[in-house]
């Protein structure tokens, strides 16, 4: 059986979520219809919304179902930007370096199409957002700032960010904040009501739900300009017939992930530490990226390394041939290997950024999976090192 160590890209659907999806797909009725079958579908949809809301510490009305994390992030950033620039000129967007490409590319689009001004905040060597820089940036030009957007957990190196402090800083400056919690959901407790932010994004397939559904948690007090216009089914924020079956399946996965969060976090922490120590013993040259595991600032599912003198994608392919699936970083770049923009934002060299591998574990990961990686890694590294690092232009150049 192949070994799967890329749970941050997507994690296997839970059997009960699959069963709930299949059963709900047999229910006929548009939840916007007023006849009894439509109202049955609406009841199922709203019960799912209530369940998801309970796992996020928000009110059900604040949950806006989307097609996934990318749409939720786009809706938050573009929607807040457009709303804040209605009747005023607030071109500035604050975001740390090393964000997910759903954020980076959205901000790039707003710069090119709308004249937005990106202000990229620095990271420290472990990928932590520098709170002093965020505080200074918010204080300097708050009246020109449309929003602050920030990852809760860095999806590549696993750094847990100080979102509570950042939310408080933004609120004090009168700037709405958006939290990308896609990589945190199912691994860390989330209490939207205590964060004091405008919006928060999550995705179902990261917690064992289906691909194709996520959610934007939008505060009752926040307002966004919608991306999609039509029937206004969800608070006039997102139009379109809602996917009842996907929402029901999402809710089943969310309930299960919340119920097992503490126990699974402890199990994954022990497994992650075993993987980290094993990699360091098997390949002494390997360098761990991100916070020390003992710091409590690394998510339990993530181990990220650079392998000096070896190309990350070469290592990936060699491990794949050995039956072990890993990643060089985010899976959202159309399968095109690029130097890690996260490592570059952390001040690492381009050679480091090309030599990265991310191992992410999840609900189905076992000790045997870690053993299989550790058995295959030394020979893969030796072979990749002989090939060396390729020098090629990248889109980051």
Image: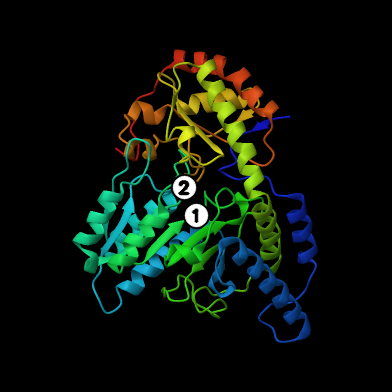
In this rendered view, identify the residue nearer to me: 380 or 220: 220
Circle 2: is it few (<14), some (14-19), or many (20+) Cα within 10 Å? many
Residue carrying label 1: 181
State whether residue 108 is above or below residue 239.
above
Q: Is residue 248 left or right of residue 74?
A: right
What secondary structure is found at the residue carrying circle 2? loop
List the single residue furthest toward the bottom. 34
Residue at 39% in and 54% down: 150
Q: How many marks?
A: 2
Report, in whole angstroms, how far the alpha carbon at label 2 lies from the one at label 1: 7 Å
Which label number is shown at residue 97? none
Q: In this view, does 106 lie to the left or right of 31?
A: left
Residue 76: horizontal and vertical position, in percent? 43, 65
Residue carrying label 2: 153
Residue 94: horizontal and vertical position, in percent? 30, 57
Circle 1: is it few (<14), some (14-19), or many (20+) Cα within 10 Å? many
What secondary structure is found at the residue carrying circle 1? loop
Residue 228: horizontal and vertical position, in percent? 49, 72
Residue at 50% in and 17% down: 283
Q: Residue 204 is drawn in which quadrant? A: bottom right
In this rendered view, identify the residue nearer to me: 270 or 302: 270
State whether residue 373 is above or below residue 209.
above
Q: In what quadrant of the picture does the N terminus appear?
A: top right
Q: Can residue 361 be seen in this view?
A: no
Q: Is residue 386 left or right of residue 58?
A: left
Residue 316: horizontal and vertical position, in percent? 53, 28
Picture colour scheme: rainbow
Q: Residue 211 is drawn in which quadrant? A: bottom right
**Does the residue at mark 2 contact the one at mark 1 (Cβ under 8 Å)?**
yes
Residue at 68% in and 55% down: 253
Q: Can residue 3 be seen in this view?
A: yes
State whether residue 47 is above or below residue 67.
below
């Amino acid at each position: 059986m192949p070994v799967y160590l890329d749970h941050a890209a997507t994690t296997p659907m839970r059997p009960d979520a699959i069963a709930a999806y299949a059963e709900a797909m047999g229910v006929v009725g548009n939840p916007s219809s007023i006849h009894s079958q439509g109202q049955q579908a609406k009841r199922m949809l709203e019960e799912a919304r209530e369940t998801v809301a309970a796992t996020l510490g928000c009110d059900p009305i604040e949950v806006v179902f989307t097609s996934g994390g990318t749409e939720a992030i786009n809706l938050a950033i573009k929607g807040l930007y457009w709303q804040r620039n209605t009747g005023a000129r607030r071109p500035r967007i604050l975001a740390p370096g090393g964000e997910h490409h759903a954020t980076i590319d959205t901000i790039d689009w707003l710069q090119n199409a709308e004249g937005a001004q990106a202000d990229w905040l620095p990271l420290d060597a472990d990928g932590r957002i520098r709170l002093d820089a965020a505080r200074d940036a918010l204080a300097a030009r708050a009246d020109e700032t449309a929003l602050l957007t920030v990852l809760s957990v860095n999806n590549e190196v696993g750094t847990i960010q100080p979102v509570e402090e950042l939310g408080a800083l933004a609120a004090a400056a009168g700037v709405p904040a958006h939290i990308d919690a896609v990589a945190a959901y199912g691994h860390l407790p989330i209490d939207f009501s205590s964060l004091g932010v405008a919006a928060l994004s999550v995705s179902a397939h990261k917690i064992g739900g289906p691909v194709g559904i996520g959610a934007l948690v939008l505060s009752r007090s926040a307002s966004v300009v919608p991306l999609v216009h039509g029937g206004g089914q969800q608070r006039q924020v997102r139009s379109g017939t809602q996917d009842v079956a996907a929402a029901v399946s999402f809710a089943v996965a969310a309930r299960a992930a919340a119920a097992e969060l503490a126990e699974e976090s402890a199990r994954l922490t022990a497994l992650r530490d075993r993987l980290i120590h094993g990699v360091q013993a098997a390949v002494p040259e390997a360098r761990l990226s991100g916070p020390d595991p003992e710091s409590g600032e690394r998510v339990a599912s993530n181990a990220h390394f650079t392998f000096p003198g070896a190309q990350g994608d070469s290592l990936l392919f060699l491990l794949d041939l050995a039956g072990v699936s890993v990643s060089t970083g985010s899976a959202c770049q159309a399968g095109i290997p690029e130097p890690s923009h996260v490592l570059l934002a952390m001040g690492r060299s381009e050679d480091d950024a090309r030599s990265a591998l991310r191992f992410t574990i999840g609900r189905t990961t076992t000790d045997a999976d870690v053993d299989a990686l550790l058995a295959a890694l030394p020979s893969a590294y030796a072979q990749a090192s002989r090939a060396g690092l390729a020098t090629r232009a990248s889109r980051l150049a």
